[in-house]
Image: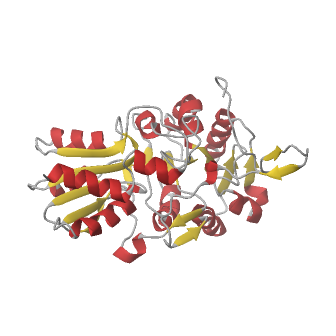
Amino acid sequence: MATGARLRRRDTGMTATGATGRKRLTTSAMIASFADPGQRTTPAPFGHALNRLAEQRPEIVGLSADLAKYTDMHIFRDVHPERFFQMGMAEQSMLGAAAGMAEVGLTPFASTYCVFASRRAYDFFCLDIAEPGLNVNVVGGLPGLTTGYGPSHQATEDMAILRGMPGLTIVDPCDSVDIEQAVPQLADTPGPTYLRLLRGKVPTVLDEYDYRFELGKAAELRTGRDVLLISTGLMTMRALTAAQELGKHHVDAAVLHVPTVKPLDTERIVAEAATDRLVVTLENHSVVGGLAESVASSLAFAGQCARIVPIALPDEFLAAGALPTLHDRYGLSSDGVVRRVLAEMK
């Protein structure tokens, strides 16, 4: 791919021309599923949650940078066409327009891919939205390693880029439950927010753990005396599966889910890490600038010493390919988590 070029599926779909000259619909790694075989899923939880919120609040509006279908914004678009704005392939303009809408009392949810929101539109995000403290909710699809399309679309460093933006709230949801419950709370947040969106058929996991999303708060999903797994995003579901498997190896693992990466629930993390358990962080993000470093700095600033093992993506541009293969290669699979923890326990 040429420098600066972007391979993107438009809302109308992408086609390819075969040897016969006839057009056929292609299958894309862009929308590949990371759900485990047989796992319960919920279709388009973000789009449906935004619709429910919009029915109660007429000031809710939606914007898309030509990616409504691939960020589940099409659910909102089809029900509320008069409150939906298609901005085309222009993320900077979309965020600038969203800022103007927020200035006049609307509550925008602006969707694109994480790579475009964080890399291409940072200046507009920072100065048009964050600096005046506007409630613009930026929804980024394909966080971390949730596409096999390679570095142009794999947002492995978006949290590292955005964590330094003053006043920004960052949410990395585990599943459909997190997303559905987070949407109205993001709309109620006075300043800007950034949601790392899981789209399409999203796994449903947290309803089995008596869990409620609370902005800025971590939640203990499982207790354990040997290992503390501190996880965010889709890695929480992997942590829960790994914890069950570790039990077969006589390793008792606790799982602390951290859906809000900024502001971080430092008090809860410091309290949970104040034991002799091995602390393992898990994130669908680069090992640089994400959850691992946030946890480490929180403990260091609190004067607390703990050994931390980060399970995260490496500090490199990742390969393209099938998601299950890539997740196993880079250690994000449940089996990979089990192997790493057992190796560290020796």
Q: Residue at x 53, y 43 (%)?
A: 134
Q: Residue at x 40, y 65 (%)?
A: 213
On screen, residue 21 versus residue 37, left or right, reads right
Residue 76 percent coordinates (x, y): 69, 61
Query: Residue reaching furthest front?
Result: 19
Can residue 106 be seen here? no
Query: Residue reaching furthest top?
Result: 3
On screen, residue 43 versus residue 162, left or right, reads right
Numbered circles on residues, count: 0
Query: Residue reaching furthest right?
Result: 21
Q: Residue at x 83, y 52 (%)?
A: 24
Residue 6 percent coordinates (x, y): 67, 33
Residue 89 higher or lower than 27, as above or below? above
Can residue 132 be seen here? yes
Residue in the foreground of this view, choosing between 321 and 199: 321
Residue in the foreground of this view, choosing between 250 and 198: 250
On screen, residue 224 versus residue 37, left or right, reads left
- Which quarter shows the N terminus? top right
| Coloring applied to the structure | secondary structure
Residue 26 percent coordinates (x, y): 75, 51
Residue 120 higher or lower than 40, as above or below? above
Residue 54 percent coordinates (x, y): 64, 64
Q: Residue at x 67, y 39 (%)?
A: 94
